[in-house]
Image (cartoon, rainbow, N blue to C red):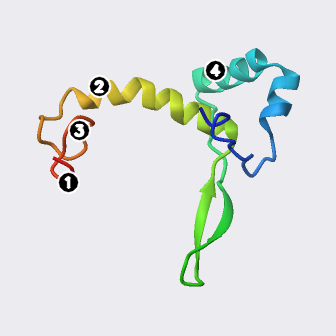
Amino acid sequence: MAKRHNGAPGIDGVTFEAIEDRGIELFLQQIRAKLATGTYLPMRNREKQIPKGDGRFRTLGIPSIRDRVVQGALKLILEPIFEADFQEGSFGNTGHNRLTG
């Protein structure tokens, strides 16, 4: 998903192309091993200053691709669990919420 959106590399500088060159399966196996052994630690986000319309800037945090993969996997697992507890009118429910109706 990050690749489809032209996701930039994080603080480690690792690009999608570098991951593909070394092998996607190896990349995923390394993440899996760290998660399974409890040794996975997320990296700091790379910070990028984005200009706002009024001349000021806002800071954008860019996670490493490895961290985005882990975050995406967790979202796929956890979102359905928590969504099941929302009421139809709950804020945060992907169906309807009090802001959009």
Residue ID for mark 2? 81
Which mark is first along the chain, 1 or 4?
4
Residue assigned mark 3: 93
Report helix, strand or loop for mark 4: helix
Q: Are marks 3 and 4 in contact (CB under 8 Å)?
A: no
**Name of the residue lying farthest toward the right:** 21
The disc, 3 or 4, on the residue closer to the chain's N-terminal end is 4
- Check if mark 1's residue and mark 2's residue have beta carbons within 8 Å: no
Q: Amino acid at mark 1?
A: Leu
Label of residue 99 in the image = 1
Q: CA distance from mark 3 to mark 4?
A: 30 Å
Residue 19 is left or right of residue 56, and the answer is: right
Residue appearing at x 51%, y 27% in the figure: 73
- Label tally: 4
| Secondary structure at numbered mark 2 | helix
Check residue 32 in the rendering and tell me which mark sits there, or answer none: 4
Mark toward the viewer: 3 or 4: 3
Q: Residue at x 44, y 25 (%)?
A: 76
At numbered mark 1, what does the secondary structure look like: helix, strand or loop? loop
Q: Amino acid at mark 4?
A: Arg
Circle nearer the N terminus (3, 1): 3
Mark 1 or mark 2: name the one nearer the start of the chain.
2
SS at badge 3:
loop
Whole-percent x and y of residue 71?
53, 36
